[in-house]
Image (cartoon, grey):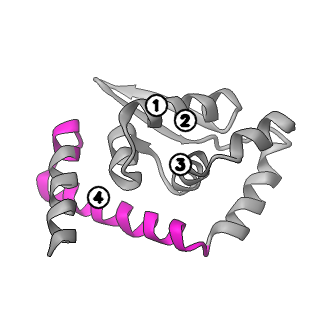
Amino acid sequence: MTGIFGLLADSSRLRILLLLDRKELCVCQIMGVLELSQPLVSRNLSLLSGAGFLDARREGKMMFYRRKKALPKPLAPLLNLLRNELGVDETHQRDLQSLGDCAEYQKKTGKCSMETFLEFMEQRKRSRKQ
């Protein structure tokens, strides 16, 4: 359990886990929502997967992650606690808004790719400057 709590002591991993608790996402979507680099997102996904929280699947070059439907016994109540305590957290609410913005942008472009991610990030930078 100390390893699990150490894993969840990182805010980036908590944010990723709460997003993936909502829906399956590809690495570039997570990068776009959290504004984190690909190596950092991939490392955190690897740690969460290794701990038993996530499932992954490959679609061409893209990797998609989601919360395991049947979490191991000590993880399920812990995730319920995190949902209840962090579900109303301001950062989590911003992440959900950003996820919605990213999904909307991808619908407009009709694709999910690293190129789309870079375009989305550029659009976000421009909108913040205005």
Which residue carries the number 1 mark?
42
Q: Give the label on residue 16, or none.
A: 3
In the image, is residue 105 part of the stretch drawn in magenta?
yes
Nearest the eye: 86 or 107? 86
Which residue carries the number 2 mark?
44
Give the mark nearest the N terminus, 3 or 1: 3
Judging from the image, what secondary structure is the residue with disc 4 in? Answer: helix
Per the model, the C-alpha gap separating discs 4 and 2 is 20 Å
Nearest the eye: 61 or 42? 42
Question: Could you say which quadrant of the image residue 50 lies in?
Answer: top right
Per the model, the C-alpha gap separating discs 1 and 4 is 19 Å
Per the model, the C-alpha gap separating discs 1 and 2 is 5 Å
Find the magenta span and give its range.
88-117
Q: Are marks 3 and 2 in contact (CB under 8 Å)?
A: yes
Which residue carries the number 4 mark?
102
Q: Are marks 3 and 4 in contact (CB under 8 Å)?
A: no
